[in-house]
Image (cartoon, rainbow, N blue to C red):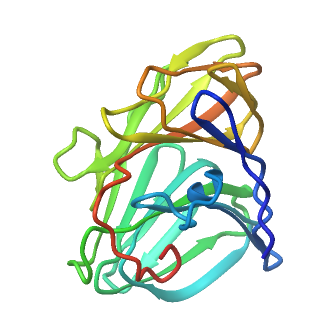
């Protein structure tokens, strides 16, 4: 599949346009964002433990039948609509703007996804993290998340031991932010880590580099980096340890 070219700026900000890697299954449509492809000549579609960020659409009345995932951490972030989950462990869960779900697939986890006929159209991100080890204990986390505060980053998942409400089994921290037009926030970062940003809605400037709707940027700078909204925007950011040990046998993310 063809992939869109990336652009490197002088300040170690690598930007990428909307992905050209998509699958259209009618009522279920996916667009695969590969953070590693933002870096020219990078030999991995993922970036460290972050394998891919998938923008997913489901029409009302859509069922994705029971299927298995293995050896990946799958995070469902649902700002628009509802995603209904059931699994062979007996869970029936609804993920929406007030909840986050992390499926720690480990050695194997079976689940199905659904929208009902009277549900609104669903647009979400499904985030695939490579775990640090193969065949870990499978399980699921589903928790309410704090209400967002305008122009502040909300920490939603992180490595085991972090202060985030949910965890993934590798070195990735995940944040979201609703930025008012003209507002500025400092991009989340950790010493020695890099940060991948994706614009879910709106448009921003990352250290004066424009990043538009469904575009992304990978920031490798050591200094603080400003994100300024040029219109009302919803953005997500991943602080990533590029040197974390990773496995590459996930069902989808790899």
Residue 158 place in picture, x, y as percent:
31, 47
For residue 119, which quarter of the picture? Answer: bottom right
Task: Report the quarter where the N terminus lies.
Answer: bottom right
**Quick check: 12 above or below 85?**
above
Residue 166 place in picture, x, y as percent:
30, 50
Residue 213 place in picture, x, y as percent:
77, 39
For residue 217, which quarter of the picture? Answer: top right
Is residue 36 shown left or right of residue 89?
A: right
**Quick check: 250 above or below 209?**
below
Is residue 117 shown left or right of residue 147?
A: right
For residue 182, which quarter of the picture? Answer: top right
- In-front residue for pair 168/248: 248
Q: Residue at x 39, y 73 (%)?
A: 72
Is residue 254 shown left or right of residue 27?
A: left
Q: Residue at x 51, y 22 (%)?
A: 225
**Quick check: 133 above or below 98?**
below
Which residue, as the protein is rendered here, is positioned at the far left?
161
- In-front residue for pair 1/103: 1
- In-front residue for pair 90/8: 8
Residue 167 place in picture, x, y as percent:
28, 54
Q: How many marks?
A: 0
Q: Residue at x 25, y 83 (%)?
A: 135
């Amino acid at each position: 599949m063809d992939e869109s070219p990336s652009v490197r700026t002088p300040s170690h900000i690598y930007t990428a346009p909307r992905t050209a890697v998509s699958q259209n299954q009618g009522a279920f449509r996916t667009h695969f964002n590969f953070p590693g492809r933002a870096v020219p000549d990078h030999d991995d579609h993922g970036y460290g433990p972050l394998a891919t960020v998938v923008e997913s659409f489901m029409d009302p009345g859509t069922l994705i039948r029971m299927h298995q995932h293995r050896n990946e951490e799958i995070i469902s972030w649902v700002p628009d609509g509802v995603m209904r989950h059931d699994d062979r462990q007996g869970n029936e869960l609804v993920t929406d703007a007030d909840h986050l779900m992390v499926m720690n697939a480990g050695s194997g986890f079976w689940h199905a996804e659904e929208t009902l006929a009277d549900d609104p159209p669903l647009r979400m991100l499904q985030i695939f993290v490579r775990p640090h080890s193969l065949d870990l204990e499978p399980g699921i986390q589903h928790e309410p998340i704090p209400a967002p505060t305008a122009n502040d980053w909300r920490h939603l998942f992180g490595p085991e031991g972090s202060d985030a409400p949910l965890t993934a089994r590798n070195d990735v921290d995940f944040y979201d932010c609703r930025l008012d037009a003209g507002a500025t926030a400092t991009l989340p970062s950790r010493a020695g880590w890099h940060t991948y940003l994706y614009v879910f809605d709106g448009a921003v400037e990352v250290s004066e580099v424009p990043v538009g709707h469904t575009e992304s940027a990978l920031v490798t700078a050591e200094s603080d980096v400003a994100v300024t909204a040029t219109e009302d925007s919803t953005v997500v950011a991943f602080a990533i340890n590029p040197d974390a040990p990773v496995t590459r046998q996930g069902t989808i993310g790899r």
